[in-house]
Image: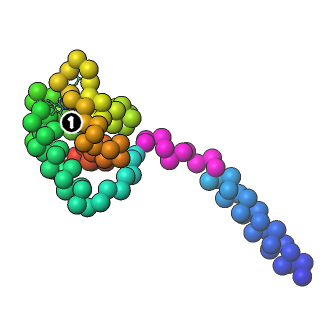
Amino acid sequence: MTTSIAARRLSLLFAAASVLIASSAPALSVEPSIEVSIAPGRQAQLKYLLAQDCGSCHGMTRKGGLGPALLPDNLAGKPDQLLVATILDGRTGTAMPPWRGQLTEAEAAWLVQQLRRGVE
Ligand code: HEC
């Protein structure tokens, strides 16, 4: 009887310890990563848009042209929100046009995710 109480106390202690460990672990959102789910058919359209429309300025392989290169290294350190806002609203005074109306916020976020991954 005494042993089983001791065992239960011990397992409670372990549970408390693991909660402590979990809460002191660094937050997962340090490097914000967007996980957006877009239907496969729409993904294909967005990839086409990226290569053709965005590619007309940023280059089909996104190495830059009229617009800057959009390779992972170029975007490193730039917050997701800034990039999503740039895609949706464009940048006043530059050639970067707004895509709001053609793209939802989730789709713009998905595009940023693709750019960061450096898809072909
Ligand atoms: C007509 C030309 C043009 C088209 C088309 C275009 N862009 Fe741009 N884009 C630009 C220019 C120019 C800039 C740089 C603006 C500046 O000077 O800040 C830019 C900036 C950006 C940035 C910010 C880059 C950074 O380093 O801050 C992103 C992201 C971006 N474009 C994504 C896209 C996407 C995605 C598309 C297609 C949906 C697209 N662009 C289509 C011209 C274009």
Q: Amino acid at mark 1?
A: Leu
The stretch in magenta equals 23-32
Left/right of residue 48 with respect to residue 9 in the rendered view: left
Q: Residue furthest toward the bottom? A: 1
Give me the residue at 35% from left, 42% from top.
105
Q: Is residue 68 above or below residue 26?
A: above
Of residues 112 and 108, the one nearer the viewer is 108
53 and 35: which one is in front?
53
Q: To which residue does mark 1 refer?
A: 70
Is residue 99 within the magenta segment?
no
Residue 95 in the image: state x and y as whole percent.
Answer: 17, 24
**Residue 106 x, y percent position in the rendering:** 35, 47
| Residue at the image point whose x is 10% and y is 43% from the top | 52
Give the camera-side residue of 81 and 22. 81
User: In the shown orientation, is residue 61 left or right of residue 22?
Assistant: left
Instruction: Let me know if residue 20 appears in the view.
Output: yes
Residue ID at (77%, 65%): 12
Above or below 21: residue 103: above
Residue at mark 1: C-beta within 8 A of ligand 1: yes
User: How crowded is the residue under tag 1: few (<14 C-alpha within 10 Å), some, or many (20+)?
Assistant: many
In the rendered image, the residue lying farthest to the right is 2
State the residue in front, 88 or 28.
88
Give the percent coordinates (x, y) of residue 9: 82, 68
Q: Secondary structure at mark 1?
A: loop
How many marks the image carries: the answer is 1
- Is residue 77 at least partly visible in the picture? no
Q: Quadrant of ligand 1?
A: top left
Residue found farthest to the front: 101
The image quarter in which residue 61 lies: top left
Quarter of the image where one finds residue 102:
top left
